[in-house]
Image (spheres, coloured by chain):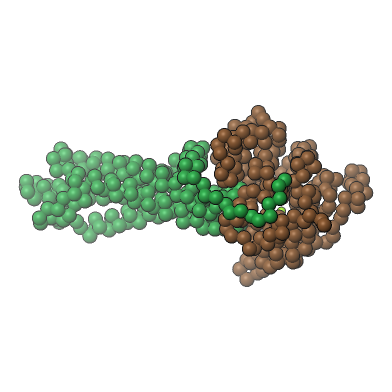
Amino acid sequence: MDQRTSIEEQIDLPFVESLKISFQSLKIRFGRSIITTAGITLGIAFLVSVWANNEIDLALQESGRSSAITNLDEASEQGISTKDIWLIIMSLIVCVVGIANSMLMAVTERFREIGTMKCLGALDGFVVRLFLLESGFQGFAGALIGALIGTLGAVLLGLKNYGMDLFFYFPLFPANPENGSFQVGVLLLILIGCFLGMILAIVGSSFPAWRAAKLPPAEAMRTEV
Amino acid sequence: MPDIVVKTEDVVKEYRMGSNVLRALDGINIEILRGEYISLMGPSGSGKSTLFNMIGALDRPTKGQVYIDGQNMSNLSQRQIAAFRCHRVGYIFQSYNLLNVRTAHGNVTLPMIFAGIPDKDRNKKAEELLDKVGLGDRMYHLPDELSGGQRQRVAIARALANDPSIILADEPTANLDTITGREIIDLIKQLNTEDGVTVISATHDLKMLDVSDRIVDIRDGLVERIRNRDEIEIEVGDVGGE
Ligand SMILES: Nc1ncnc2c1ncn2[C@@H]1O[C@H](COP(=O)(O)OP(=O)(O)O)[C@@H](O)[C@H]1O
Ligand SMILES: [Mg+2]
């Protein structure tokens, strides 16, 4: 064995290596990855469906005012109601808590793995980057599916309420009618959902991963789940 | 002059749990020579794993110093500690600590990925190492598909990936049956004699006695005594008779 007297500094891994490791990890624990991703999908689907449903109601009410559709349930109450705002805020909270929880669980059960990687020479930054990549990918995929499911749900509900009128007045793009309230539009909503899901997944996983990475490996490896 | 690889100076480790303080190591002073096979012996809870963690830079002592190759470990930067774990030490644990998402081969390549060794070289070396530990035909199996003894062999191959000068083993045979345990001990001993790797192994497995150059008896966080090989051999006779 060679006798090195001074200890060198650990190198940073090339990005491609990190990418390969994270994808392999997602692939092999596919079943578990799906469950975590499903958590994200559910949260975003719920949020997007509530919000898109609201957008649809707004758009159709708006059209009702101009084309005199009067058989709307809440035709008396124009614009976005306090109840709707509450519903959206509640679904946002459910979404944030749900995603944070599923990411936290997914990281906690991998503390031992984190400690082991550090024994083999992983830098703290590498551990965080690994979780960032994995969760970013899961977050985007999960949120996109969730946003689409949520939109589909809102469309089905809209069809039931408004019939074919839905398609004539479908709020696809942002709109700001003169005497109505601003509408985000379903397209932008889907984008917001994807972005939100990805950010929540990344924050929800990188933060606990960062805390685990800072622990001495002995402590990280002791954690039993 | 003897070539000292590991030296601990009054190493104390305390664990704080609420208002209680548990002193797991109570001032450990040992010197380990290059190429030695050292066994840390002692009953469960005596502080073997804690000392293992201090020597392997897996945790920091509360007080005292650990020197490896004359380097004071508490003076190292984060990057140096990572490089130290990557290049200087190979760790072997009681519960193998393989990454379940990577194959045997993938486990062995990981430390080499961290060391920046190119794809082709590390793949070849992983194959050689797995061959060496007798797993040539199981390279691309996941840990879940291997027996305990096979997993520990993968862990040994992984520990050797970056040609460490020290192998640290924490009760490597505790989860194995007698025969498999014996094989694992022989394999570690072989690395010690053939490659000159310094082996530091925590154990309460008496089979470890006759391969050790010295035995450090640990009790209640203190070094109770240190026995040399010649003193041991007499006692092994007794052990064999049980
Ligand atoms: N992380 C920890 N937190 C609290 N107490 C610990 C921790 N690690 C070890 N101990 C305690 O320190 C003592 C020594 O433990 P350990 O070094 O694991 O002993 P051994 O490996 O010889 O069985 C034991 O009393 C154990 O309960
Ligand atoms: Mg122990």
Classify the position of the N terminus of chain B by image quarter. Answer: bottom right
Q: Can residue A184 be seen by looking at this rendering? A: yes
Image quarter of residue A138: top left
Above-or-below relation of B65 to B199:
below
B110 vs B218, nearest the viewer: B110
Residue with the most extreme bottom position: B19
* Residue depicted at x 63% and y 36%: B126
Q: In the rendered image, what is the letter of the chain coloured green? A: A
A7 vs B217, nearest the viewer: A7
Residue with the most extreme top position: B137
Q: Can residue B105 be seen by looking at this rendering? A: no
B20 vs A115, nearest the viewer: A115
Q: How many marks?
A: 0
Above-or-below relation of B209 to A30:
below
- Give how far across and how far down residue B230 sits, in percent: 91, 50
- Give how far across and how far down residue B219 sits, in percent: 79, 60
A53 vs B35, nearest the viewer: B35
Q: In the rendered image, what is the letter of the chain coloured brown? A: B
* Residue depicted at x 54% and y 58%: A214
Above-or-below relation of A70 to B134:
below
In the shown orientation, is residue A156 left or right of residue A15?
left
In the shown orientation, is residue B14 left or right of residue B214?
left
* Residue depicted at x 69% and y 38%: B153
- Give how far across and how far down residue B8 sits, in percent: 74, 61
Classify the position of the C terminus of chain B by image quarter. Answer: top right
- Give how far across and how far down residue A83 sits, in percent: 24, 58
* Residue depicted at x 58% and y 48%: A117
